[in-house]
Amino acid sequence: MNAMNIRTETVADRDAVHTLLCTAFDGDGEARLVQSLHADGDVVLSLVAETEGVVYGHVLFSRLNVVSGDTYFPAVALAPLAVSPARQRQGVAAQLVEEAHQRLIASGETLSVVLGDPAYYGRFGYRHGDAESFESDYQCEALQALRWDDVAPRMGKLVYAPAFGGL
Ligand SMILES: CC(C)(COP(=O)(O)OP(=O)(O)OC[C@H]1O[C@@H](n2cnc3c(N)ncnc32)[C@H](O)[C@@H]1OP(=O)(O)O)[C@@H](O)C(=O)NCCC(=O)NCCS
């Protein structure tokens, strides 16, 4: 099999990513979320996995703020993450997430939050214990955080990009 290439999503990838998200998820909710995040300028990092131009994996991180009083601390939210059914269980998602994390750390991000299965996201270091003190409309065991630096807050209200309100 030819090598997988992980790179930043471009405008030319948008249709392929839309199709991928509609295929991997039940419905077009995540595809529309991604469209809105792009339109609103809230995308921090969006990567695709492809081979010879065929896109089969995608991960996106959007801006999220941890708000405490008048203080807004910028963090990122991981969502969505998707791999085409035919390419699942081959480590594609893991490589997308690890590459994204390296880029986010290099660009100075200190905190990432995800809402998902702890059995899956735990392998990347996400912990509910690091998210349980946040105030959030989505507070539950599935809410997990990954801290890359001690400057990252442990408390405050998680304010997602407006596009999440349309889910
Ligand atoms: C979740 C998803 C992105 C994983 O992609 P992938 O490329 O197959 O992932 P990897 O190959 O890196 O890892 C596969 C492993 O994750 C496990 N896994 C996949 N989804 C999981 C889940 N929801 N909960 C727990 N484990 C999960 C698989 O069982 C497999 O385990 P193994 O390594 O012990 O065999 C892919 O299954 C997908 O697109 N699913 C539909 C969309 C979705 O649910 N996205 C996540 C939204 S939060």
Image (tube, grey):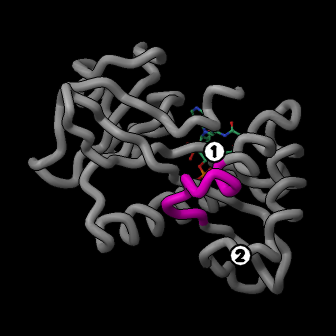
Residue 64, quarter of the rendered image: top left
Q: How far apart are marks 2 and 1 (CA)?
A: 16 Å
Residue 71, image x, y percentages: 20, 37
Q: Locate the C terminus and report the quarter of the image it occupies.
A: top right
Q: Residue at x 85, y 31 (%)?
A: 26
- What is the number of the mark on residue 10? 2
Pick whichever, 87 or 136, lies toward us: 136
Vertical arrangement, residue 75 with respect to residue 45, above or below = above
Ligand 1: which quarter?
A: top right
Residue 62 lies, with reference to residue 162, above or below; the image says below
Identify residue for label 1: 80
Please rate how many residues cluster around mark 1, counting C-alpha atoms within 10 Å: few if below 14, some from 14 to 19, many from 20: many
- Pointer 2 and pointer 1: residues touching (CB < 8 Å)? no
**Residue at figure coordinates x 39%, y 62% from the top left:** 101
- Badge 2 or badge 1: first in the primary sequence: 2
Q: Work out which residue is located at the far front of the displayed protein and give it.
A: 70
Q: Does the residue labelled 1 lie within 8 Å of ligand 1?
A: yes
Q: Describe residue 156's horizontal placement relative to residue 92 as left or right.
A: left
* Amino acid type at mark 2: Thr
- Seen at 70% across and 55% down, the residue is 39
